[in-house]
Amino acid sequence: MDYIYFDNAASTPLRKEVKEYMLELMDGAYGNPSSTHAQGRKAKVILESSRKSIAKNLDCLPAEIIFCSGGTEADNAAISLAISDLGVQRILTSPLEHHAVLHAADRWAKHFNISVEILAVDEKGRIDLEALETKLANGPKTLVSLMHGNNEIGNLLDLEKVGNLCREHEAFFHSDTVQTLGHFPMSLKNLPVDFATASSHKFHGPKGVGFLYIDRRVKVSSFITGGAQERGLRGGTESIVQIGGLARALELACADMDQDRAYILDLKRRFWEGLKALFPKAYTNGLSGEYDESLYTVLSVSIPELAQDSMLLFNLDLKGIAVSGGSACSSGSVQKSHVIAAMNPQHEDSVLRFSFSRNNTLEEVQKVLDVLKEMKAKL
Ligand SMILES: Cc1ncc(COP(=O)(O)O)c(C=O)c1O
């Protein structure tokens, strides 16, 4: 069976060029980058050239990139460091954040006895920025944590606007940029963001590796204690193969970005148009139907005409089509999404998240529409 993979917001397949480079590194760069002998130095060169390449692609300094195990670790680190090292007494965040942020905020806030305030969102998931400004004008030293691109509904945030508000009120700003780094042009030097987070498997790199960007003016100590790796911030021998793969994947993503973006947006647009023609009652969730205000990779829809098919995701899977019911859940079960519930607690229709990548084709779009049409006919 030919599989169709429309779940790229959960994870993207490794790019062939990245895999080849990683295989090269597996054989050739086995030294510990902290060792002073030739094999160690070789690994160190790969580590630092990867960091440089990432910094060049994101327009920041190499020293601002701290490698770690991925988005979850980077989000946790940003939040815990802001509280432990920067004197933050309050976290302002939104109900749309990934659990890596929401659970970390809850945990560290409890641990340090500080407050977490959740900003209101409207029925499209737009964050109330006026309320943010009012809150920032009053209250203690604050960390604002708001994601750039939402993994479930695709909503994009104006980083410049939020970051400038934070600067005006001397708050720190962390943005979970896991869904947007490698997908949108980014000049971290020019963005008013103190912490940003990345995960390589969202742009065709390997899983289990990512980084935390920390603006050079923000002074923090270690978030994982041990050796002095990563400028003393994150102890542990760096995984050279993963880091090399991450850097290569980002290089390729940035080089192909304009072309890929136009191509993927066209797939999303055609898929949504086809879906609407088939199911007149179908609607998009959040801003994912607003092409300028959402991730071009994500289309979140509900299809009332298919509501009777309680096994929809399972039936699509049987047909070799991978999509998600909102968001991938770590336990493997699909639970009601906290993001959808935050926008509309009464939302009853099931949610399908189709997410696309450069590997998908128009032919696949048509095949999935055909399968959905067949399912409709059988109801
Ligand atoms: C927005 C967002 N933040 C954080 C994460 C977690 O990243 P990782 O899988 O690298 O831990 C994800 C992954 O699903 C994500 O989509």
Image (tube, rainbow, N blue to C red):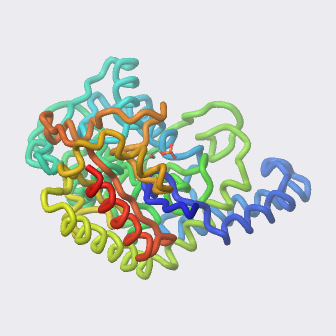
The residue lying at 89 percent from left, 57 percent from top is: 39
Q: Nearer the viewer, residue 222 or 274?
A: 274
Please provide percent x and percent y for residue 109.
Answer: 34, 24
Q: Which of 62 and 323 is in front in this view?
A: 323
Can residue 87 be seen at all in this image of the molecule? yes
Please provide percent x and percent y for residue 68.
Answer: 59, 45
Can residue 186 be seen at all in this image of the molecule? no
The residue lying at 47 percent from left, 65 percent from top is: 182
Image side of residue 207 versus residue 82, left or right? right
Image side of residue 254 versus residue 290, left or right? right
Count of numbered circles on the image: 0
> 235 above or below 23?
above
Image side of residue 69 versus residue 146, left or right? right
The residue lying at 35 percent from left, 46 percent from top is: 312
Please provide percent x and percent y for residue 215.
Answer: 43, 54
Question: Which quarter shows the N terminus?
Answer: bottom right
> 118 above or below 43?
above
Give the residue at the far front of this rendering: 378
Please provide percent x and percent y for residue 378.
Answer: 29, 53
> 358 above or below 69?
below
Q: Nearer the viewer, residue 124 or 139?
A: 124
Question: Would you identify the image quadrant in which residue 121 lies?
Answer: top left
Q: Which of 148 and 329 is in front in this view?
A: 329
